[in-house]
């Protein structure tokens, strides 16, 4: 589920739509969390769906560490890529804002951690990267981990409308991390290795 203080807005014919903040979203806010309505489709199920559905999965889903396609039921599927994204995935099934997001600003994440099946050339930005590759997670996880770790303590300091979606046991784990009782998991745990792929 995507953060409620967002709206869908048309950008241009190339990008299509994007998701924009309707009010300020502070750093450390959970901006998206996997929920019970999101559809998880195994590779075998995707193949049985047939070629009609392939472009939809390709455009609107990401792959989890088991290689399944996760199709968000709400506008979360319209979050666009940026090499300078303001949201990043944690080592869990939720994303947080890694800097303050202003009202009217687009919410973005880095598709490099979404286990893409093939590379694509992104729009030019102030970045040394031009392409998003399927194995970007192996190359940039330390950088992303640092951004998440710097923002993680704010999880308990800011308003969290999506916190009810986080299981109680995980909420306790988050508190332990913030209190220094356990390390924060790396975003690298999301990487889809061939041996982890479910049929």
Image: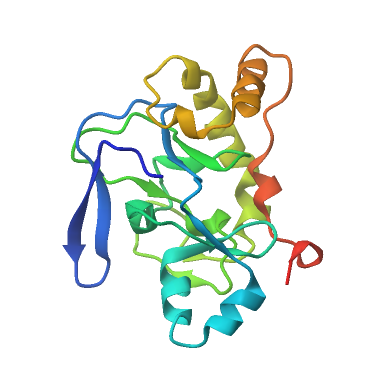
Q: Residue at x 69, y 34 (%)?
A: 185
Q: Quadrant of the N terminus?
A: top left
Position in image of residue 43 (x %, y %): 64, 74
Position in image of residue 60 (x %, y %): 42, 66
In the orientation shown, which residue stands out farthest toward the top? 179
Q: Residue at x 77, y 61 (%)?
A: 196
Position in image of residue 12 (x %, y %): 18, 66
Which sits in the foreground, 174 or 98? 174
Which sits in the foreground, 22 or 86? 22
Position in image of residue 50 (x %, y %): 52, 86
Q: Is residue 171 left or right of residue 111?
A: right
In the orientation shown, which residue stands out farthest toward the right? 195
Which sits in the foreground, 152 or 140? 152
Q: Residue at x 49, y 57 (%)?
A: 111
153 vs 198: above or below: above
Q: Residue at x 42, y 32 (%)?
A: 162
Q: Quadrant of the C terminus?
A: bottom right
Q: Is residue 35 left or right of residue 104?
A: right
Which sits in the foreground, 77 or 103? 77
| Residue 113: quarter of image | bottom right
């Amino acid at each position: 589920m995507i953060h409620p203080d967002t709206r869908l807005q048309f950008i241009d014919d190339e990008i299509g739509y994007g998701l924009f903040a309707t009010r300020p979203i502070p750093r450390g806010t959970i901006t998206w969390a996997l929920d019970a309505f999101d559809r998880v489709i195994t590779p075998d199920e995707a193949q049985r769906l047939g070629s009609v559905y392939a472009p939809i999965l390709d455009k609107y889903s990401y792959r989890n560490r088991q290689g399944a396609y996760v199709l968000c039921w709400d506008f979360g599927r319209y979050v666009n890529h940026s090499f300078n994204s303001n949201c990043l995935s944690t080592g869990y099934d939720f994303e947080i804002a890694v800097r303050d997001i202003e009202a009217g600003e687009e919410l973005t994440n880095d598709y490099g951690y979404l286990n893409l099946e093939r590379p694509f050339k992104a729009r030019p930005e102030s970045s040394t990267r031009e392409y998003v590759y399927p194995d970007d997670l192996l190359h940039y996880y330390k950088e992303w981990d640092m951004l998440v770790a710097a923002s993680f303590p704010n999880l308990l300091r800011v308003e969290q409308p999506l916190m009810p979606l986080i299981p109680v046991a995980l909420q306790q784990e988050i508190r332990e991390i913030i209190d220094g009782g356990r390390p924060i998991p790396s975003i690298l745990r999301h990487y889809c290795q061939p041996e982890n792929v479910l049929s």
